[in-house]
Image (cartoon, rainbow, N blue to C red):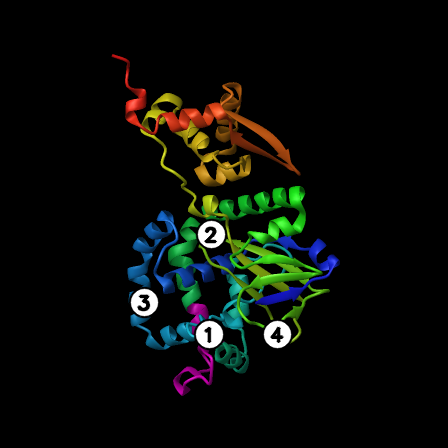
Amino acid sequence: MGWWLVNADTLASGRFVISALAETTACVKLLAKGTAAHPRERSWLDDHLPCYRRTLRRDPVTAALLDAALGARTRWIADLLTPPHPGVGSPTFHEELAAVRETPPERAYADLEVSFGGPLPAELRRPDAPGRIAGLLEWVWTNTVEPDWERRRRVMDADAVARAAQLSHGGWATALDDMSPGMRWLGDGRLQINVFDYPPRDVSGARLLFVPVTPRTGWAAWKEPDPDRYAIVYPCSAPLAGAGGAPVPEALERLLGPGRARVLVLLETPLSTTQLVALTGQGLGSVGRHLRVLLDARLVDRRRAGRSVLYYRTATGTALTDGVQTPGDLAEPT
């Protein structure tokens, strides 16, 4: 298994950041894989996968470079493809992309050979390799991510709020254990990053960044030769990543109205107002009004978690949502 040695200062200063480049790279991984983890991903792939594949067929050199960078054989993503977030400020996608585009060719070859698992074929040792990969990332961003960026950002912001709530309840060990598959706190300053047989790294003294993405994927990133920051890119929790949840029963929509019914269905899992805004796409004011009505009707309740307030369904609210799942339950008595 791969693990990092993390001292208390590094862990205490760890912070969540949003990265448009990480989200785009995660989408590239999803497009390359071509299979979905939930219905929203399936719908997104149906919309974008055919055009993505046509784009690669027209440029076989870039397609081969991307295949090497994604580590199909080694399961190691090239550092070229995953520069860590600067850790300060809110860089734009193009500002982050510059780190890929400006990678020196020799550095790019070294990164690609690690992910490829051996010497690069001569046709891939090209001085324009970083530019080609950056160009493909830019295409994916412009055509598949940017049009939906505000919703994606709300989902990632909401996930960070949920992680902060976990921190307030159980500390870093609780927040880290379910952050990404294979990731858990081992104790004695050891953080297991994944289940692969990679050598341990001492990251004490560096900045530790946690970067949520909406596709169901993740990786660790740092920049050699002397990294001053490490990033853990992880998938948003399933209800947020899906950003749709269970369907709202039509009968419940008629009873409560579509917006309020959607909020009640989503509160099967405790969520903050910020998370509900991200999941429903409704405005903060609308979500607040729905919650007040549901609280007054005792269909939901709330509790404080650190700086956040989490809302959840009461037994009455659950009985109502479960009761309208079957049309026969609403039939008038004969």
Q: In this view of the protein, can residue 156 be seen by the observer?
A: yes
Res 85 seen here: no
Residue at numbered disc 1: 74
* CB-based contact (under 8 Å), mark 2 and mark 4: no
Looking at the image, tell me whether mark 3 or mark 4 is earlier in sequence order: 3
Expressed as whole percent of the image width and height from the top left, the position of residue 288 reads: 52, 28
Under circle 4, the secondary element is loop
Label 2 – label 3 distance at C-alpha: 23 Å
The reply, left or right, for residue 89 in relation to residue 280 is right
Q: Give the label on residue 214, or none.
A: 2
Crowd class of label 3 (few under 14; some 14 to 19; many from 20; radius 10 Å)? some
**Real-space CA distance between mark 2 and mark 4, rounded to the nearest whole angstrom:** 27 Å
The CA span between labels 2 and 1 is: 24 Å
State the residue lying farthest toward the bottom: 122
Q: Give the residue pinned by disc 4.
A: 224
Which range of residues does the magenta coloring cover? Answer: 115-135
